[in-house]
Image (tube, rainbow, N blue to C red):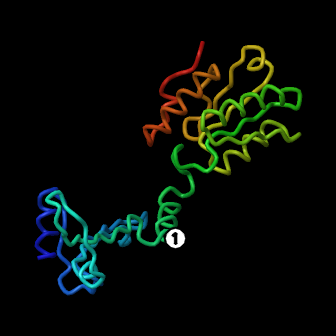
Amino acid sequence: MAEQNIRSVVRKLGLNHTEGIGDAVFYGPKIDFVVKDCLGRDWQLGTIQVDYNLPERFELEYIGADNSAHRPVMIHRAPFGSLERFIGILIEHFAGAFPLWLAPIQVAVLPVSEKFNDYATQVAARLAAAGVRCELDDSPEKIGAKIRSASLAKIPYMAVIGQRETDAETVAVRCRVEGDVGAYKVEDFIAAIRREIDTKSMNSLVAAKGAVG
């Protein structure tokens, strides 16, 4: 009955599937989600298992709409399988260059020199307040070294701040993929960043939008 119920579900959903006849499982039949990594290897990640057995053994019951006792069906759900294996596959797949919404640091704020640190601190605070994971590099390093460091760390966006940006209250945006994409008003940059995060886009919406004149 459990096997047939699972067959009915995958057929109803139109899932591309094969049956692993004779595979060992605990509790009852299950759906395995198999993913190919960047090297073409197959990995079992998520599993969903239908269990009619343990509710019986634990004598589980609930009161239904008819005010009578019913036995539930237990569903064992492991959406990522082994979390460590899932994270390992994810890191390999992106080679550490995560899309914006997954990146540990989403924006690096880079003042050209120490005299622009105050404005850079304000920009970093506004990004953080908008829920953007950012990092302020206020070290005495030259801007070229700061950009190189952020690039090697595979940070998706850099907000470079010099005299022009401080005077105009903008940021000069550099994208990890497209390179320099021009100056943005801080609020416009934050809006574009949030849109890319919220939609989980794989492409740069900041670069696509275009900068201020």
Please name the residue that numbered disc 1 is placed on: 84
Image quadrant containing the C terminus: top right
Q: Is residue 140 left or right of residue 190?
A: right
Task: Tell me where residue 8 appears, x and y as whole percent.
Answer: 11, 65
Out of 35 and 56, give the one closest to the viewer: 56
Residue 167 in the image: above or below residue 182:
above
Task: Tell me where residue 43 appears, x and y as whole percent.
Answer: 38, 72
Name the residue at 72% across, 29% down: 123
Residue 115 in the image: above or below residue 36:
above
Task: Tell me where residue 208 appears, x and y as whole percent.
Answer: 48, 27
Name the residue at 16% across, 69% down: 6
Determine the image quadrant of residue 49: bottom left
Q: Is residue 210 left or right of residue 109?
A: left
The residue furthest front is 67
Q: Amino acid at mark 1?
A: Glu
* Label 1, residues with CA under 10 Å away: few <14, some 14-19, many ≥20: few
Out of 29 and 183, give the one closest to the viewer: 29
Name the residue at 21% across, 78% down: 52
